[in-house]
Image: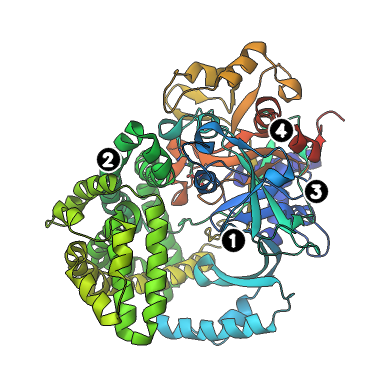
Amino acid sequence: MRFLKIIFFFIAFQMTAQQGGMWIPSLLEGMNEDEMQSLGSKLTAQDIYDVNNSSLKDAIGHFNGGCTSEVISPKGLLLTNHHCGFSQIQSHSSLENDYLRDGFWAMTLEEEIPNDGLFVEFIVRIEDVTDAMLAGVTNEMSPRARQSKIDINRNAVVKATQKEDWQGIKIRPFYKGNAYYLFVTERFEDVRLVGAPPSSIGKFGSDTDNWVWPRHTGDFSMFRIYADKNNRPAKYSKDNVPYKPKHFLPVSLDGIEEGDFTMVFGFPGRTNEYLPAVAIEQITQKVNPSNIAIREAALKVIDANMKADDQIRIQYASKQARIANAWKKWIGENLGIQKSGAIAIKRKFESDFTKALKAKGMETEYGTILPEFSRLYNEFEAVNVKRNNFIEVFFRTNELMQMAFRAFQMEQAIIANPNNLDKAVESFKNRLKRIHKNYNVNVDKGVYQAVMPLYTSTVDASIYDKTAFTDMDSASKLLEGTGDEILEKLNNDAAYQYAKPLIKEFYTKLEPEFQQINTQINALQTKYMTALMKVMPEERYFPDANSTLRVTYGKVNGYAPRDAVYYDPVTYLDGVIEKYVPGDYEFDVPQKLRDLYDAKDYGQYADKNGKLPICFLGTNHTTGGNSGSPAIDAEGNLVGLNFDRVWEGTMSDIYYDPEICRNIMVDLRYVLFIVDKYAGAKRLIDEMKLVHPKKK
Ligand code: ARG
Ligand code: ASP
């Protein structure tokens, strides 16, 4: 009987443990620890997060603010995705040294390449500062009054927090502002490129395979953190030395099998799991489709140019990947929301919520939330769509419009205070330089012609022949002289004249209207979250992702995307060869990799059937930002490198369906195989700690 009870306990926990969630590492004791152990984990909460002793969290670094990375050797060797290190790899690439195409391997420490501006940040400790942050905050306050009280509290909290000089502090809202956590951080700014496979491995399958399973991409790159002589963060210096981490992840050579426990530890960026149905409708039916159309138009132009010209291919590689990635994700998200019936499910949930409100006599307090959402989103729709489209055109796709936007900001700064002149011009010039580093005027003009008609009815491509901004020299000339002279030249520039009314409309109409409604929506969302946790306390609530360190866990698991189809959770090198298309820009396979395959020369990296695993799936709930996150086994060893999700489950940012949402990881054995057998960078393997947890 007792035995049965225990079994029941574990089954019940296994079921809920599969429901997703991204959890705060300092709060795992209790429910999360139990759930993880029910899935097979042997780790305790302290193994994962500990303030006084080193723990897994000390190996996890936020990579340049957008991705995740992990330390895998006592000498600060860092692993992340190829697509996370992509712009660094690109920035060191040229037609002569094409690291994007051919890969790059530093064979000594001296050959490791510094990266201007790149940083990696670790979490020293996490504190719950909810009470201090919300002291004096009441439900009756207007959103603005609430925010200014919180800002005052924030200053006091920061002041009262003890930290070392070289450490930083971040405070972030959780549960839509119902809780606040503080993070003490350590940021390393000397991070050097160590190795990257060729794109035909690191980006194998490119856009066709992106967001798709089965997958065969070796999406990894390696960096190294350098510190000063005291092992502390320091700006780049040739005297810096490899960082000695508090913890690094041992790498398992035994890999995974279907059903094995995995956890993914990283910095998920943004999710929105508690939106009302009306919001999901607006996103999927209005915002996504118009944004998709703009990106699609831009991509057609960029893709064609990249295929025709190697110089353009290198210049636009990073931009193209960024534009294509969200474009495809939104398409998948829309399909997934439709297929999973997410909107109907949310509606049903909302009617349960309404019933529970009645049953508990809380209607007066919370009964207006859902009708208010409907009213606000209705009012929001036009401006929300238009503002989104503006951002797509002026920031994501067309570069001349982006330059005009920055010019407008410069003009405003100078008008506001003529003493700003030098600073404003300087910062605008730096922006221009960054854009021009990878700029081709014909590509950009093509993009303009393709995207602009989707935003406004006045389109005039002749501005490209009459503007100073398509060329860095003429742009610099325009920026010479007194403030008055510069502004006069600027206002006579054809591209600026064209863009200015659109930018003005953004600042005077779109942005204020958007903010005005959005503030109300956010305040309502805070109240909705409070209400949910009070009225339906039995539900399982996790805080939305907000670029802070989180743990998510699950099992290695395949899935059934549609009737009669089941996807196995592991792919093999055989599948790379199956997809091989000689000379193809997406599916070419390097000769050396084909030779290793023919010889079955997999060394210690083959699985027990003699096959070389490439990627695998798990039920870990991940999102953008989790790229580069380690997949960790039941004993704390590294088994995989997270980099993507499956097509049918890309909607997991707004609706997590445990049946079909899966994350995609590179098997670490493939990573090691490429480093060792393909690249011959044995020195890197030698500094790692390779383990056999399953052969004890
Ligand atoms: N979809 C993954 C993520 O959101 C991987 C993107 C990189 N790969 C690519 N083909 N663009 O970042
Ligand atoms: N590919 C994403 C990233 O770069 C991960 C994801 O969205 O699943 O973070």
Q: Are marks 3 and 4 in contact (CB under 8 Å)?
A: no
Q: In screen coordinates, is 71 left or right of 276?
A: right
**Disc 1 secondary structure class:** loop
The quarter of the picture where residue 185 lies is bottom right
Lower position in the chain sequence, tag 3 or tag 1: 3
From the viewer's perspective, tell me whether residue 591 is left or right of residue 258: left
Tell me if mark 4 has few (under 14), some (14-19) or many (20+) residues whose alpha carbon lies within 10 angstroms of its own: some
The image quadrant where one finds the C terminus is top right
* Amino acid type, callout 1: Thr
The residue lying at 67 percent from left, 18 percent from top is 611
Find residue 681 and name its label: 4
Label 3 vs 4, first from the N-terminus: 3
Residue denoted by label 3: 74
Q: Secondary structure at mark 4?
A: loop
Q: Earlier in the sequence, mark 1 or mark 2?
A: 2
Instruction: Name the residue tied to disc 1.
Output: 548
- Looking at the rendered structure, the secondary structure element under dot 3 is loop
Specify whether tag 4 is near ligand 1 (CB below 8 Å): no
SS of the residue at dot 2? helix
Q: Which one is nearer the viewer's eye here, 56 or 508?
A: 508
State which quadrant residue 524 falls in: bottom left
Identify the residue under disc 2: 301
Residue at (71, 37) in percent of width and height: 107
Q: Amino acid at mark 3?
A: Pro
Rendered location of residue 528, percent (x, y) = 44, 68
Asked whether the viewer can see residue 77, the reply is: yes
Task: Tell me which numbered mark, 2 or 4, is placed earlier along the sequence.
Answer: 2
| Rendered position, 682 above or below 173 | above
Mark 1 against mark 2, which lies toward the viewer?
2
Foreground of the two, 597 or 234: 234
Other residues around mark 2 within 10 Å, as few (<14) / some (14–19) / many (≥20)? many
